């Protein structure tokens, strides 16, 4: 999936996260994460975000995540939504979301 | 016999509530993609619910998704998300006729085939929210073997009837019609939500009424209402004690090959035994009434 425009998903409420995606300045994929629980769960959050992006076939763009202590399922959901909005996806490949 | 006293509504777009609601232990949790979600967050709520349904904790509790009506741009996508994520029950809002349920059933079966889910494993419930729906309640209740229950939704119904919520008189006919339809179809019946969280006495009065009418339970909008509802549905110690004696006497009669059993001079037949089993089930779920 190709990110063609800037898009947001999620909130800054507790147990949620805000994900911002954009085409990015370069050609590669850049992921920037900030979290209230970065020390304990930073690696896990990074893994979930990158795995979700890989399943969606996202190989380029800038992904900025501001986490407020969300569970993995919420992280996946917000990244998926932001990417689909940023890619202006008209259909959903459900197998890529599972 | 699945207990369905409490069905807790959760707004589908709220990550915090979806991540924690199971701790309140309602009998069923309903993820709402319809009225509780704004138009611009329909997509994010659908994806969030799709992911939340796959949490292991939600395999231990009955899950329900209220989809948007199938004649909106959102309904079919909501249904795809719910069925593919393995939801137990799909709740159809604004059900006016048996045909609404039949259309839903065909779509569910198509999705089950497409994603490899066991055909028939997705159950359905229909919410009746209009005068037409109430008139057609029996046909709706019998429209599909997948239906586990029908629910009355009060707000839209009273709007359709050109009245407003009051002491319950305005819902009397609809409650009785929906309940009779459910019982004739041998499925469950759910009452309307009580929206005034600060009026606990009013809530309990309504619970007492719908319990005596025969409803299985009620849709709830706040976890605070769960314990109150379960306690109101819990039997008294005397009822539990009597139910235990009925079940024991019935078992003894069956062991002796007797068709009819008597307990303290009173005949015990099938309906009495079934009722006693329901009493014991409620007591096992939440103890005796406090």
Image (cartoon, rainbow, N blue to C red):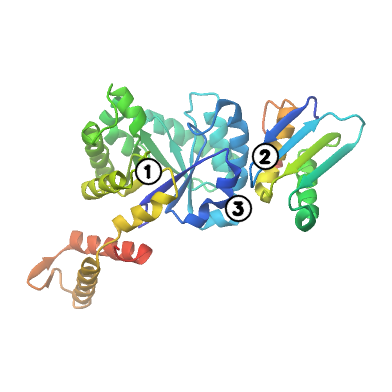
Indicate the quadrant where residue B152 lies.
top left
Residue B224 picture location, percent across and down? 42, 50
Q: Quadrant of residue B196?
A: top left
Describe the element under mark 2 as helix, strand or loop: loop
Q: Which mark is residue B7?
A: none
**Furthest-left residue in view?**
B265
Residue at 58 percent across and 45 percent down: it is: B85
Q: CA distance from mark 2 to mark 3?
A: 22 Å
Name the disc covering residue B55, or none: 3
Residue under the image location 53 percent in, 36 percent down: B79
Q: Nearer the viewer, mark 3 or mark 1?
A: 1
| Figure disc tally | 3
Furthest toward the front, the residue is B198
Q: Which residue is mark 2?
A: A12
Question: Would you say the residues marked 2 and 3 are in contact, meaning their CB atoms lie under 8 Å apart?
Answer: no
**Residues at marks 2 and 3 on the same chain:** no
Q: Chain of mark 3?
A: B
């Amino acid at each position: 999936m190709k990110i063609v425009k800037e898009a947001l998903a999620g909130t800054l409420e507790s147990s949620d996260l805000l994900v911002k995606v954009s085409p990015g300045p370069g050609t590669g994929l850049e992921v920037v994460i900030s979290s209230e629980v970065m020390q304990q769960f930073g690696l896990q959050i990074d893994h979930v975000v990158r795995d979700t992006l890989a399943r969606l076939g996202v190989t380029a763009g800038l992904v900025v995540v501001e986490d407020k202590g969300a569970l993995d399922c919420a992280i996946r959901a917000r990244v998926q939504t932001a990417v689909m909005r940023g890619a202006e996806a008209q259909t959903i490949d459900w197998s890529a979301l599972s | 016999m699945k207990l369905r006293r409490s069905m807790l509504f959760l707004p589908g777009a709220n990550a915090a509530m979806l991540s924690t609601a199971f701790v309140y232990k309602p009998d069923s949790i309903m993820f709402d993609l319809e009225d509780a979600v704004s138009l611009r967050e329909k997509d994010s709520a659908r994806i969030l619910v799709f992911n939340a349904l796959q949490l292991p904790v939600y395999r231990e509790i009955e899950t329900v998704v209220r989809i948007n009506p199938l004649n909106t741009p959102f309904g079919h996508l909501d249904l795809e998300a719910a069925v593919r994520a393995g939801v137990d029950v799909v709740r159809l809002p604004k059900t006016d006729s048996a045909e609404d349920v039949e259309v839903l059933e065909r779509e569910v079966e198509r999705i089950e085939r497409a994603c490899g889910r066991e055909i028939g494993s997705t159950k359905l419930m229909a919410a009746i929210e209009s005068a037409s729906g109430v008139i057609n309640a029996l046909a709706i209740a019998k429209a599909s073997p997948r239906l586990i229950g029908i629910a009355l939704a009060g707000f839209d119904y009273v709007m359709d009837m050109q009245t407003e919520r009051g002491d319950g008189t305005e819902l009397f006919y609809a409650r009785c019609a929906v309940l009779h339809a459910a019982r004739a179809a041998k499925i469950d019946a759910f009452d309307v939500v009580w929206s005034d969280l600060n009026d606990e006495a009013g809530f309990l009065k309504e619970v007492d009424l719908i319990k005596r009418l025969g409803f299985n339970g009620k849709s709830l909008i706040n976890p605070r209402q769960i314990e109150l509802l379960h306690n109101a549905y819990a039997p008294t110690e005397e009822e539990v004690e009597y139910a235990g004696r009925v079940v024991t006497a019935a078992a003894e009669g069956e062991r002796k090959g007797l068709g009819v059993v008597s307990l303290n001079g009173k005949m015990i037949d099938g309906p009495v035994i079934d009722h006693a089993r329901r009493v014991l089930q409620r007591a096992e779920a939440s103890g005796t009434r406090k």
